[in-house]
Amino acid sequence: MMVGAEVVEGVELEAAIERPFEDPEVRYLHLHNARPGCYNGRIERA
């Protein structure tokens, strides 16, 4: 289930990736470009 979404500048990407993982229930993120359908990859909790 999607629990959030955020659009950030590239220099803010690392912090934007870390924020959702503060919630122990979040297992992975899907990373997209800002344009629809531009899937870049999946980031999993380490």
Image (spheres, rainbow, N blue to C red):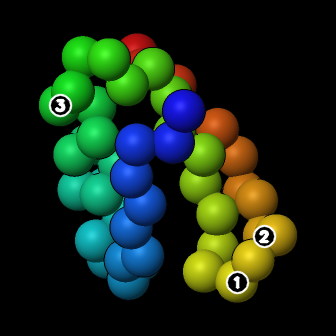
- Mark 1 lies on a secondary structure that is loop
Kind of residue at badge 3: Glu
Q: Is residue 10 left or right of residue 43?
A: left
User: Which residue: 76% across, 59% down?
Assistant: 39
**Residue bearing mark 2:** 38
User: Which residue: 23% across, 56% down?
Assistant: 15
> How far apart are the alpha carbons under marks 3 and 1?
26 Å
Instruction: State the image coordinates of residue 29 (x, y, percent, origin top left).
Output: 51, 39
Instruction: State the image coordinates of residue 35 (x, y, percent, origin top left).
Output: 70, 83
**Residue bearing mark 3:** 22
Q: Nearer the viewer, residue 45 or 35?
A: 35
Q: Quadrant of residue 16?
A: bottom left
Mark 1 in CB contact with mark 2 (< 8 angstroms): yes
Is 45 drawn above or below residue 32 in the view shown? above
Q: Do we see residue 3 in this rendering?
A: yes
Q: Earlier in the sequence, mark 2 or mark 3?
A: 3
Kind of residue at badge 2: Cys
Q: Is residue 10 left or right of residue 23?
A: right
Where's the C terminus, which quadrant? top left
Instruction: State the image coordinates of residue 11 (x, y, percent, origin top left).
Output: 32, 76
Residue at the right extreme?
37
User: Which residue: 54% across, 33% down?
Assistant: 1
Q: Do we see residue 43 in this rendering?
A: no
**Residue bearing mark 1:** 35
- Mark 3 lies on a secondary structure that is helix
Is 34 drawn above or below residue 38 in the view shown? below
Kind of residue at badge 1: Arg
> How far apart are the alpha carbons under marks 2 and 3?
25 Å
